[in-house]
Amino acid sequence: MKKKITIIGSTGSIGTQALEVIEKISDEFEIIGLAAGSNVDLLNKQIEKFHPKTVCLGKKAEIADKSVKVLYGDEGLEELCSNKENDIILVAVSGKIGLRPTISAIKNGINIALANKETLVMAGDIVTKLAKENNVKIFPVDSEHSAIHQCIKDISQVSKLIITASGGPFLHKTVEDMKNATVEQTLKHPRWNMGRKITVDSATLMNKGLEVIEAHHLFGFDYDNIEVVVHPQSIVYSAVEYADGSVIAQLGLPSMHIPIQYAITYPNRIEGIKSKSFSFAEIAHLDFEKPDFEKFPTVKLAYQAGKEGGSATICLNAANEEAVFAFLDNKIKLFDIYAITKKMYNAHNIVKNPSIDEIFAIDEEIRIKTRELINN
């Protein structure tokens, strides 16, 4: 029997790659729902190819196939993700919009393939508690967390998680180079082809800070037992260290198809879309180094926020995101992203156990204040 799946964010980078995976293993899956923001043309093509029963759009628009049920907005996303026909829902939207539909799916006992950082960064305690109460599994899609998931056989025997970072386009540049970096230079990632926002986060290493927070919630490890290591070749996706000192790592050539496929087919491994066969001889050598916190101070700030907990991570995420958007609009310099995020963080009064409504209210308040700071 085919697994029934819904993809929210189907026209984005992860969503389109997920559909490539599913097309390759179409005898394993039936797509019953798709959700997109505003790319109606691409969504229409996806509907024609995959025949979902229901779709959701960010705002009112015409869908070519009149037999498809069409939902709209945040309420539509929650309804789409409440459909108990689903065996699994891939959350591939970026931003806070992914949080409520994820919670809706969990409350309805539907497993999650998670490719949305904000869900756990903003509300990790709430989401993981709900998942446990509803016997729901959360399968990580991010390559680093997928690697950790693949390396863990018995989590009780693991002593440390090791998350790798490529170092981005400025790994071998100076602090002055980063201070004078243009948007164009920042978006030239040496290894990965990603969206603009996450590519900037990769350049500042904030993405690794956010991944540390995610890993804490996904795997239940203290922050002191989660290590970030710079690995410019991006061959070792991540690793775990066991109590006896053994380290097990997951390796491969840069590709999101593998972690996407593993999340939705777990615990099975299917040939599907396979990256180029891995050759140790061709790779020749692998480099590792500690992050330079003078160039990448965002990592330390993320650890601090994670350890403080509560609304600290909401503030970190919202302030950083607004600063990144300002940088992409050429309103500020790259290094200003950290300065602005740090200033907003220092001014924030942490709420220890915010509710979902409070999380969204705090997020919006931080964003407004961050924009005011940038404009002034």
Image (tube, grey):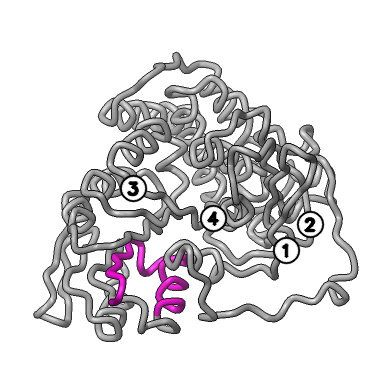
Determine whether label 3 and label 2 are within 8 Å by CB: no
x then y, percent, for residue 164: 71, 50
Q: CA distance from mark 1 to mark 2?
A: 9 Å
* Residue 121 is covered by the magenta coloring: no
* Residue 12 is covered by the magenta coloring: yes
Q: CA distance from mark 3 to mark 1?
A: 37 Å
Residue at which label 4 appears: 142
Residue 302 image-quadrant placement = top right
Residue at which label 2 appears: 232
Determine whether label 1 and label 2 are within 8 Å by CB: yes
Residue at which label 1 appears: 190
Count neighbours of disc 1 (C-alpha within 10 A) and say few if under 14, some if 14 to 19, many if 20 or more: some
Residue at which label 3 appears: 136
> Counting residues from the N terminus, which is met first, the one under dot 4 or under dot 1?
4
x then y, percent, for residue 262: 50, 65
- The amino acid at mark 3 is Val
**What segment carries the magenta color?**
1-22
Determine whether label 4 and label 3 are within 8 Å by CB: no
Residue 147 image-quadrant placement = bottom right
Q: Using the image, determine if residue 108 lies above or below residue 61.
A: above
Q: CA distance from mark 4 to mark 1?
A: 18 Å
- The amino acid at mark 2 is Pro
- The amino acid at mark 4 is Asp
320 displayed left or right of 105: right
Q: Mark 3: which secondary structure?
A: loop
Count neighbours of disc 2 (C-alpha within 10 A) and say few if under 14, some if 14 to 19, many if 20 or more: many
> Counting residues from the N terminus, which is met first, the one under dot 1 or under dot 2?
1
> Which quadrant: the N terminus?
bottom left
> Counting residues from the N terminus, which is met first, the one under dot 4 or under dot 3?
3
Q: Using the image, determine if residue 209 lies above or below residue 33.
A: above
x then y, percent, for residue 180: 74, 45
